[in-house]
Image (tube, rainbow, N blue to C red):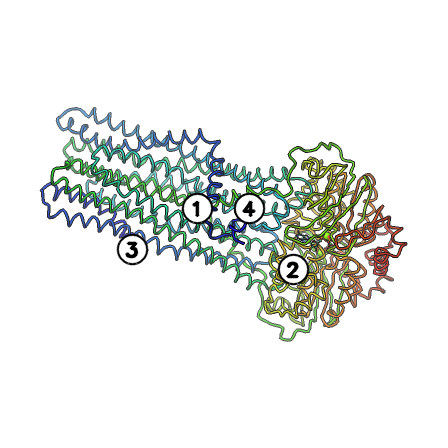
Amino acid sequence: MWAAAVLGIAAAILTPLVGKEIIDGPVAHGDQDALLPLGLLALALGVAEALLTFLRRWSQAAPVLGLETAIRDDLYRHLQRLPMRFHDEWQSGQLLSRATTDLSTIRRFLGFGVLFLVMNVLQLTTVTVVLLRMYWPLGLLVAGSAIPVIILSNRFEKRYIRISRQVQDEQGDLATFVEESALGVRTIKAFGRRRHVAATYDGLAGKVYRTSLEKVRLSSRFFTFLEVVPNVTLAMVLLLGALAVGGGWLTLGTLVAFTTLVLQLVWPVTSLGYILAMGQEAMTSADRVVEVLDTVPEIDGGAQVVAEPRGHLRFEGVGFRFPGAERPVLRDVWLEVEPGETIAIVGATGSGKTTLTALVPRLVDVTAGRVTVDGHDVRDLSLPSLRSVVATAFEEATLFSMSVRENLTLGRGDATDEEIRAALEIAQATFAYDLPWGLDTRIGEQGMSLSGGQRQRLALARAVLGRPRILVLDDTLSALDVETEALVEEALRAVLADATGLVVAHRASTVLLADRVALLQDGTITHVGRHADLLAEVPEYRALLAQDADLDQEEALR
Amino acid sequence: MSVEATGDGWRGVAAEEQDHLSDRVSLLLRTRSRRLLGDLLRPHRRGMALLVAIIVLSSAAGLAIPYLVAVGIDDGIPPMLRGGGPGTLFVIVAAVVAAALTQALTRQAFLRLSGRIGQDILLELRRRVFDHFQRLSLSFHEKYTSGRVISRLTSDVEAIAELLASGLDGLVTAVLTLVGTAAMLLLLDAHLAVVALLPLPLLLLFTRWFRRGSSVTYRRTRETVALVIVHFVESMTGIRAVQAFRREPRNQEIFERLNQDYRDANMRGMRLVAVFMPGVKLIGNVTVAAVLLYGGWLALHDAVTVGVLAAFLLYLRQFYEPMQEISQFYNTLQSASAALEKLSGVLEEEPAVAEPRHPAALPYAKGAVRFEAVEFAYPDGPPIIPALDLELPAGQTMAVVGTTGAGKTTLAKLISRFYDPVDGRVLLDGVDLRDLDEAALRRSVVMVTQENFLFSGTIAENIRFGRPDATDEEVVAAARAIGAHAFVAALPDGYDTQVGKRGGRMSAGQRQLVAFARAFLADPAVLILDEATSSLDVPSERLVQRALRTILADRTAVIIAHRLSTVEIADRVLVMEGGRVVEDGPPQRLIAGAGRFARLHRAWVESLA
Ligand SMILES: Nc1ncnc2c1ncn2[C@@H]1O[C@H](COP(=O)(O)OP(=O)(O)OP(=O)(O)O)[C@@H](O)[C@H]1O
Ligand SMILES: Nc1ncnc2c1ncn2[C@@H]1O[C@H](COP(=O)(O)OP(=O)(O)OP(=O)(O)O)[C@@H](O)[C@H]1O
Ligand SMILES: [Mg+2]
Ligand SMILES: [Mg+2]
């Protein structure tokens, strides 16, 4: 590729020389025989130049694109490994702009910029060297003109880096906002806030607009400067050169050659601006990408695997605090769930039930104590092993715009049709077979073309598919009507009979699925016992679950 | 389905996934993109004219410099050699400096002005497309997915940004040089000029070939990058399930395949350019060689002078050099056109739920809702609501119950006009919803959806979404009214707590409370609650219910709930089954009867045990 580039440029430089040769040679001397070979040479050079350019362009496509593609694959792989904590903080718009815009900026620089930068610098140095040898005082003048260029380039670079980073970040914010307003379009419509949202978008787009303009102004100043320097140098060369000729230190012919060469410097210097700007942008883009790639996945699997999982789950003095939060959400939680046992977790809204369940498949990690599965600290288990033991039905269905089948099997592409049917039957979700294309029906983004209860049942079916040893149900019956709920509970009972269950519940009916109940209060488990016993003995528990509880008593508890 | 099969198959975003289009369709699409481009450029006609003027001046100054240097050498130095003063030389050097400064200043003016125009156009385009997306109905968004929306508003807009940033500059300069040089060539020697310009038709043919190839390729690039984005966004949005269910390897496989497709499309694009640009160069170089030979031969036979030949060759190079720039411009233009095609397609989509041309006046809604023989089916779906007549007097609180998938949410969505009925009409205070403008409708009808979406920002901002001009006190009052104040006040930052993206830092119940407060603050005449308390614990739910008694006293309400405790506060219960109303009446009467609701209620009471 580089060879093709260099040879191509050489051919481009040689062609005009041949023209000169023809005019000075055959034409001037009336030498008809020499015309044809020289003309053919010019033709050959022209063809060669085109061919070499072609070769360079053609051959550079694969490596440059290959690099971009590889980085994007890596980025995606890395993002999939990064824990929930990272994803809670990072908007996908920002991640996306790194995976698309930034990577193509880098690609463009590598595919075009680098080559030109090297060629430009090469051309600049060779010409300057030639000039120095031709007549060193003037050559020095030309070389000296590089000094302001270098100083200013440096200053420009610093500011340009800052500003192009700002533009890129703001574009990421803009993408984030676009994403949010697309995902939240129902809410926006429900409140008729189209204009309000558009105004916010305008604000963000306006920011990008202003920063981009600032960038344009900055670069326009720099580019212009780069254009003035060689031209003014030229004027100086002409002036001083003429004086030198007048003084007899320089021949006129040399001066002509000299100025012609200086003229050749104008374009490389001018275009340096564009290329440097491009390079800067590629650098900040690379920074942004590396920022993500360098984030260490703090949740990384251990080496152990549970060979024959029994589903013995223990929370040992578990504490959890969200990063930056003052108070821990969970503290000193002790809970033992025997294999095959089902425990219901009951607690007020926001008491930390979901957080507790997320600790088991290590979607988040404990900040104190440990969680064990069959005696292994979950942090010592490999993630695939752990996560094949534990399956969760989340409180939000979390579906994808894929077919029902893909949504159900997600990580288990090997699930058989019978297993799928069994799971759908447990979750009372056989409606899926009646969809227009059966299990192959695409269910819209986040399952939006299904009813709320249908979504929830699919999520449940997904969790029970393949009968995991530990089943976590996070309030997964909330969107079901009483009758369906009863049917699901009936079926779940059979599943939970031999699996270990952790069932988050707000309703007494769901609690009844469990053998024992744990009451979560103030971030810790205060009572564990049978539903009836707790109901009788613990007033707080009664307040949380009994429909007829005295309202004033609840008030007192808040 | 092929684009040809349906007459209007190319309209809107329909042609997005088509790889190969017939000539007729691609012509239509091209005209559509051109129209959009014209639309965007039109307000900047003056600026563009000014730009061209500036660039002419700038090029003139730029071209003057070598000329002045030559003059300086020819006319400035000889007098000095003859012992004269350097006067002429000084004048000429001053002229060079002046030309250089002129060029610099005009150049700067050009860069700034063109930068501004470019950014203006981008801003306008962003606004337009964003606003249009928000205008389009839910049925559109369900199919189109957020990933596509994002890809239109990011990568497509960027493709156009590139055209605006680099396009004009190169094009104008190139065209100027081209035209100027062609004139010079003709002036110098018409005979030779004809030879020199002979390959132009060939060039045109070649360009045509490139346009055909590149329009397919660049469409493909846009489409494949959109797929990459869609998959990326969706897997990041659902990362919780991805990780918990070990979907990563499969996702990686899919992503790499899509990424590969994108790479292949890009590769095809780069290879096309790799043929096109050197091809143009080849034509130019061969022409130069031919002129050299032919001109040399002519010169030998004294048909042209050596001087003319030399000048001719110089200019000829100048003629074919800008061709590179033009082809570069053409390349960016093609890539931008593919993006414009997608964007203009989006802009062409008509909202299925359209705003009325002549909106009916409804300054103050009382809140009486009526369904008249309403039939409804989701696009391309089976009928969900076969035929529904329903009268909901102002001020009534109606509970809607029924098995999941019965069509309760659908009913609610019809009242809030997320969709229009296929047949029949929905009326608010006797006015067809289709005749109400958006503002009036949303002022009167607000729905708390089953999936309570929070925007990133603070709790206060999210509640205020219900009424952007509400004061802090009103925000707190709304939260207090529905029992959310206690938990918010307990947070370290109170109402200024960041809820995180999509409300991720709140628990499910807390999200629901915030969403509820948001709806309450909006204070509509008709309030629709779609399972708005399903994730709450019993005490919080009770609190909400108690609040509802006062909140709903003076407004129409539709409450969808599975927990029948909510139903107790209703004046009336509607039991739905398969899109039909199977029971309708006051709760006490229905409970006392022997119908569906009585059974449901019994089951529910038992479940409370
Ligand atoms: N990412 C986060 N950063 C900071 N705080 C958080 C985050 N996620 C949750 N919280 C807080 O932690 C607490 C526990 O949340 P969690 O979701 O576990 O509650 P929950 O018991 O599941 O409630 P619910 O019944 O409403 O689902 C809540 O007060 C919530 O505000
Ligand atoms: N956007 C959509 N596109 C196509 N079909 C849909 C869409 N939304 C709902 N449906 C279908 O319409 C039917 C009724 O759905 P709806 O959401 O009205 O049920 P629902 O009574 O609210 O149920 P749930 O209690 O589960 O929320 C369901 O069969 C569902 O699959
Ligand atoms: Mg929860
Ligand atoms: Mg519903």
Circles 2, 1 touching at the beta carbon (< 8 Å): no
Q: State the SS at label 3.
A: helix
- Amino acid type at circle 4 is Ala
Whether the residue carrying mark 1 lies under 8 Å from ligand 2 is answered with: no
- Which residue is tagged 2? A367
Circles 3, 4 touching at the beta carbon (< 8 Å): no
Residue A250 can be seen, yes or no: no
Whether discs 1 and 3 lie on one chain: the answer is no
Which chain is disc 3 placed on?
A
- Which residue is tagged 3? A3
Whether discs 2 and 1 lie on one chain: the answer is no
* Crowdedness near tag 4: few (<14), some (14–19) or many (≥20) residues, C-alpha within 10 Å: many
Please say if A329 is above or below A226: below
Measured in 3D between alpha carbons, the distance from the residue under mark 3 to the one under mark 4, in whole angstroms, is: 41 Å
Q: State the SS at label 2.
A: loop
- Amino acid type at circle 2 is Thr
Q: Nearer the viewer, mark 3 or mark 2?
A: 3
Which chain is disc 4 placed on?
A
* Residue at left offset 13%, top offset 25%: B83
Measured in 3D between alpha carbons, the distance from the residue under mark 1 to the one under mark 4, in whole angstroms, is: 21 Å
Task: Point out residue A259 in the picture as x, y percentages from the top left corner.
Answer: 22, 37
Give whichever of discs 3 and 2 has the lower sequence position: 3
- Amino acid type at circle 1 is Ser
Measured in 3D between alpha carbons, the distance from the residue under mark 3 to the one under mark 2, in whole angstroms, is: 57 Å
Task: Point out residue A27 in the picture as x, y percentages from the top left corner.
Answer: 12, 42
* Residue at left offset 35%, top offset 51%: B274
Q: Nearer the viewer, mark 4 or mark 2?
A: 4
Please say if B198 is above or below B579: above
Measured in 3D between alpha carbons, the distance from the residue under mark 4 to the one under mark 2, in whole angstroms, is: 33 Å
Give whichever of discs 4 and 2 has the lower sequence position: 4
